[in-house]
Amino acid sequence: SLFFITVCTADGFRYYMVADCEFNSSKLNDIEFTLSFYYNKLEFIRFSSSVGKFVGYTEVGIKNAERWNNGQEVIARRAEKERYCFHNVGVFTESALTKSGEC
């Protein structure tokens, strides 16, 4: 898995996003992209490439999911699996394979 985290804080509250590429091969069909949004350790909304849309887990998350699923945000996220994960998985697996034989 590849994990990338962005963290922002304001007045003691923590907002962060986690982008994740889960894969068991470098084939595009074997990769899942997820983007989760958290506020104070509570996940309130998530995009998953296997679902193809945002899903909200709180009142605020549900409202944002409805809005984002009807706009450009969902279209942009659907492209992330290929743009972001596919490229980075290839780089990661190539690096891991070439370094695995080194002592």
Image (cartoon, grey):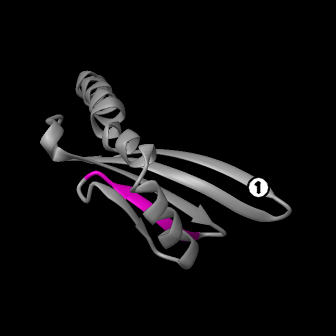
Which residues lie in the magenta part? 42-49
Q: Nearer the viewer, residue 44 or 24?
A: 44
Most prominent secondary structure in the magenta stretch?
A: strand
Quadrant containing the C terminus is: top left
Residue at 14% x, 36% y: name it: 27
Q: Nearer the viewer, residue 39 or 3?
A: 39
Residue at 76% x, 55% y: name it: 9
**Residue 66 belongs to magenta span:** no
Looking at the image, which residue sits at the far right?
A: 11
Identify the residue under disc 1.
Answer: 9
- Assign a secondary structure to mark 1: strand
The amino acid sitting under disc 1 is Thr
Tell me: 92 left or right of 72: left
Q: Position of residue 15 (x, y in %)?
A: 66, 59
Count the marks: how many? 1
Q: Position of residue 66 (x, y in %)?
A: 44, 65
| 27 vs 55: above or below | above
Tell me: 18 left or right of 25: right
Looking at the image, which residue sits at the far front?
A: 70
Tell me: 89 left or right of 16: left
Residue at 43% x, 49% y: name it: 71
Tell me: 98 left or right of 36: left
Q: Position of residue 10 (x, y in %)?
A: 81, 57
Q: Nearer the viewer, residue 61 or 25?
A: 61
Q: Quadrant of residue 93?
A: top left
Looking at the image, which residue sits at the far bottom?
A: 59
Q: Position of residue 88 (x, y in %)?
A: 34, 30
Residue at 48% x, 72% y: name it: 62
Q: Tag 1: Cα neighbours inside 10 Å, few (<14), some, or many (≥20)?
A: few
Q: Nearer the viewer, residue 83 or 99?
A: 83
